[in-house]
Structures are given as C-alpha cells and as structure tokens.
Image (spheres, rainbow, N blue to C red):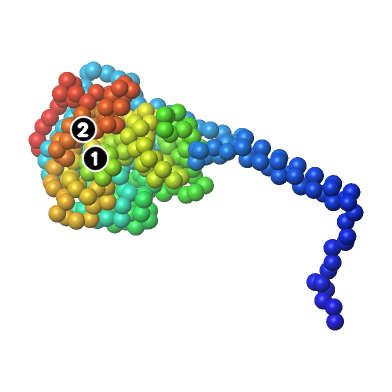
Amino acid sequence: MPSKNDKREPVLSRRDFLLRTAATCGAVAAAGVWGYVFYSKEPVRRSDTKIYTFRDYRIADTKVYPQLAVVHGRDAERMVRAAVDKIGGITRFINPGEKVLIKPNVAWDRQPEQAANTNPAVVAAVVRLCLEARASEVWVTDIPVNDPYRCFARSGIEEAVKRSGGKIRLTQESDFLPTDLKGESLKVWPVSGFYHQADRLINLPIVKHHSLSKCTMGMKNLYGSLGGQRNRLHQDINTSIADLATAIRPTFTLLDATRILRRNGPTGGNLADVSAGDTVIAGVDLVAVESYGLRFLDLKPEDIVFIQMAEKRGLGTSDWKSLNVAEMTL
C-alpha cells in the first residue's frame, strides 16, 4: 500500500526552474546585505531600540571637606560612619526621597573570611547610613561571576542587607538595557537597568590582587554593572577598566580594606592569602582612593596601567598625598 508520505515533486519546466533559482539567489543576496548592515562587534545588536547613557551620580564639588578619609580600626560600623562623616556626612551625598544603588563586590561564591567579596558589615553600615538620610529605597546589586544566589548568601551580604533594611536586586535577563559607554574599547553594552533607575550610586569595592590587572578595587568593581560576554573585556583589560571609570561616575567610593586578598585574586579561597587591613577609605576621587589602596598590595600607581590611563583622562589624581586627607584610628 502506498504511503501518504510518498509524494513526488512535479517536474519543473526550464522557465519555472530559472524563475525559482533567481528568486532564491535574490533572497540570499538580500539576507547577506541585511547581515552586513546590521552586523556589529558590540554585544548589543544595532536596532531601533533606545540606547541609554549613564547619568552622572556625583554631587557638586567642594573644597570645604577633606577629599580623602582614611579610618583604621576593627569596628566596621564605626569606621564607615567616621569615614563618611569626614568627607561631609551622608546628607551631603543623599537627599531625602532619592533611590540609592550600592555596588559592592559580590562576584564570588566565597565566605566572608576569604576576602573575595566586600565585607558584609561594611555593606550593612552604608545601607543604614543611606536610610538615615531618608533615601526612599536602598538597593544593593552586583552581577556575580558565580551563581548569584549562592554569592549573596555565602558572602553574608544578603543577610546583612536584609537586617539593615536594604533590598537585594538581582539582575534578570529582561533587566539589561543597551547602554553606550562611549569608550575606546567599550561601546554599546548591556547594562543592569537598576543603574538607570537610581539617583545615586555608591561604589563599595574591596582591595584584592588580580591576576590580569594586578589589582581590583573601585574601577574594576564597576564591571559588575555589565552583562554580556564580560570575558571579552580582558582582551584589553586596562582600556576597558579606564572606559568604565570614565562612563560611570559614582557619588562616592568607600574602599573596604578591612581584610586584603593579597594573592590568587580575584577568586581567592585560601585563607593563607588573606591579611588584615583594618582600614576603610572614602572619597569622591576614585583615582585617589584606588591609589591609596595600592599600599595594601605593595603596589604603586606607576605599576598600574589603568590608573595611569584614568589620570590622563582627567578622572582624578594618583598623587593622593597632594589632597586634603583626614586620617584617624578608632
């Protein structure tokens, strides 16, 4: 019995064959032109979609307050409060009703003592300060390399943020927005939409060794705003870091040097690679904050290419000693 699937194509005349061949070739050619026009090396495809840009989260500059605050001690809460007070107090930076986004380093599935992520006690202290300034909402976010739920849980940051009254915001695929970083290496890139919803941005990095860039602190911490294939940025890591620092201008940076990952960064894991720093550094000049932090890794500004690039772009000064610096021990 013949099968219903046993069908034969009708025999084509020479004229029909030529017409079909021409139509197929035309379609292929059109697809090739379309692909050429819309091909991009950037991770965000060109289209009619709105392209965003970062707002400037900074406040008006003033010389009234110290430009850098360095506080040594063992009590993270007291240290954070003292550092922020020295540079003008939290109400200098946060107005009532504003939405505040806090960006710690929560990239790795590590416990607090392994120093791969920002100290949860430091994060909690900053959240409480923002709420005391009557921020309408305080969000804490990062785009981890490891599983985000495990990173926030095992780092202790999830619990610390909840206890202090903040909210953890994890970026889902639908939350990314194409954003033009206008950099030499970084052009249009998918960025967490939370950055476009917040009024203020507090950069909350930790001092760590990094196998490629030698160190990771405030500038490198901004990688956690990006989606897409971030490993591509490592092909020209110094320019990428300088591009990020140029595009994203935090309200202020508070550098966590309470414990230092001195080797095998950025992931760490071995407690033998961790040393006590017992310090926090706060300031609005990210280059200066970062330059001070290099001492914990036995590095100098001239050792770090991206710091030199950032300084040449006018993003701050690596000569932090030339600034008005307030230093104290609690």
Asked if disc 1 and disc 2 are in contact, CB closer than 8 Å, the reply is: yes
Q: Few, some or many C-alpha atoms within 10 Å of disc 2 (few <14, some 14-19, many ≥20)?
A: few
Residue visible at 50% across and 38% down in the picture: 42
Q: Quadrant of the C terminus?
A: top left
Q: Quadrant of residue 285?
A: top left
149 and 27: which is toward the camera: 27
All told, the count of numbered labels is 2
- Amino acid residing under circle 2: Asp
Q: Is residue 65 left or right of residue 127?
A: left
Residue under numbered circle 1: 214
Residue 252 placement (x, y as % from top left): 29, 31
57 and 25: which is toward the camera: 25
Q: Quadrant of residue 103?
A: top left
Counting residues from the N terminus, which is met first, the one under dot 1 or under dot 2?
1
240 and 51: which is toward the camera: 240
Residue 169's tag is none
Residue visible at 27% across and 47% down in the picture: 266
Residue visible at 17% across and 20% down in the picture: 322
Residue 112 placement (x, y as % from top left): 23, 53
Is 220 rendered above or below residue 152? Answer: above
Residue 242 in sight from this viewpoint: yes
